[in-house]
Amino acid sequence: MSAKCLYLSRADVEAVDLGMREIVAALEKMFLEKAAGRVEMPPKPGIHPGADAFIHAMPAFIPALRSAGVKWVSGFPANPARGLPYISGLIVLNDVDTGFPKAVMDCTWITAKRTGAATAVAARRLARPESGALGILGCGVQGRSNMEALDTVFALKKIRAYDPDAGAAASFKKEAEARFGLAVDIVGTAEAAVRGSDIVVTAGPILKVPHAAIRPGWFEAGAFASLVDYDSYWSRQALREADKFCTDDIAQLEYVKTQGYFEDIPPVYADLAELVAGIKPGRESPRERTIACNLGLALDDMATAPLVYEKALERRLGAWLEL
C-alpha cells in the first residue's frame, strides 16, 4: 500500500479562504488545551544564517484536535528588497496514528493569519472592550493580518498607520479602506501612531538589538500593545511603563532570551493560556497599560493547519504526491 501526501501551494492555501473568525476560535480552543497541560510543544530551535535572519523548526502536538506536525519557517529582513516575502516556509502535517506526513503546505498565509488571531485572543483579555483607535507600526503582512483580526473583536473606528516605507503605508491604507471600510491616517512618525491609540501593534522585522523607536510617555494609560516583532520597536523605559507584560509561552520566551533577545523586559505577568482559561485575570482597571508579546507558537500553526487541510480536501485543492 503506497502512502500519499497532499501538497498545498501558497495559492492553494489562500484559495481555501479560511475565515479569520474561524482561526481566532481555533486558537481559543487550543489555548484552553494548553492551559490544561494537554499539548506538547518544545521551545523552537533555530539557526541564524545572517544578521537578524532566522530559520526555525516549530513542532507541536494537540491531541484534542488530532493535530501533529512541524513548521520550518524563515524570516530574512533583506528579502523585500529582493522582491521576496520576509517570511517563507512549509508546514508538515502528520497522521497521528501512523506518523506519516499527510500534508505539506506553504506556511506564509497561515503564519500571517494565526499571528493576527493570537493578537485578537490576547486583546480580548487585555484591551478595553470599547477600544476603537488602532495604531499600526509596520504596514506589511503582519500589520494587515493584525488589523483584520482586531477588526473581528473590536468596533475599530480609526487607524493611524506608520511605516518608514511610504509605499507600504499607502498600500495598507488602500486595503484597509477597500476591504474593511476602515478610515486610515498615514502618520509620519512612530510617536504619532502610538499617542492616542487604544491598541498599538508593532509589526516590523524581528531584531536582536531593538531600534527602540517608541519612547516613554507615548503609551497611553488604558492602552494595550501587541508586540509582533518581539521588543524591536520599544525602548526599555517605554516597556517598563506597562502594568502587565504577557506572552504566549513563558518557556519559549526564556529560551529565546538565551539566544540574545529580550535583554531587558519587564517580569512576565501571565501567559496567554492562563488568561484564556481565567487562571489569571486580564485587564482589571480602565487605566492599566497592558502588553502581549506573542512570540508565535507552533501550537498556533497546528490549530490552523488542520482546518486548511480539511477544507482543501472538500474543495479538491492541491496535488497528491507519492511518499
Image (cartoon, rainbow, N blue to C red):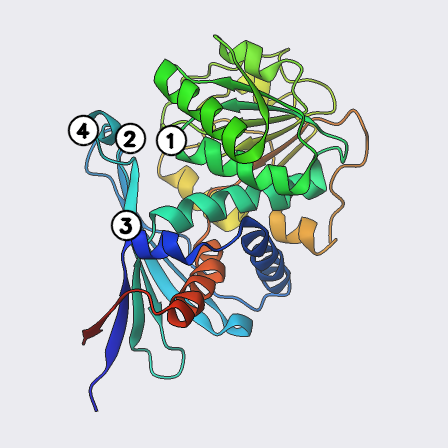
| Nearer the camera: disc 2 or disc 3 | 3
**Side of 52 where 261 appears, left or right:** right
| Nearer the camera: disc 2 or disc 4 | 4
Residue 17, given in percent of the width and then of the height, sits at: 45, 54
Residue 317, given in percent of the width and then of the height, sits at: 32, 65
Q: Do the residues labelled 3 and 4 touch (CB within 8 Å)?
A: no
- Does residue 210 appear in the picture of this structure? no
Which numbered marker is on residue 82? Answer: 4
State the separation of the CA atoms marked 3 and 1: 17 Å
Which numbered disc, 4 or 1, marks the residue that appears first in the sequence?
A: 4
State the separation of the CA atoms marked 2 and 1: 7 Å
Residue holding disc 2: 52
Dot 3 lies on which element? strand
Quadrant of image for the N terminus: bottom left
Q: Do the residues labelled 2 and 1 touch (CB within 8 Å)?
A: yes
| Nearer the camera: disc 4 or disc 1 | 4
Up-down relation of residue 41 to residue 155 (above or below): below
Which numbered marker is on residue 89? Answer: 3
Which numbered marker is on residue 206? Answer: 1
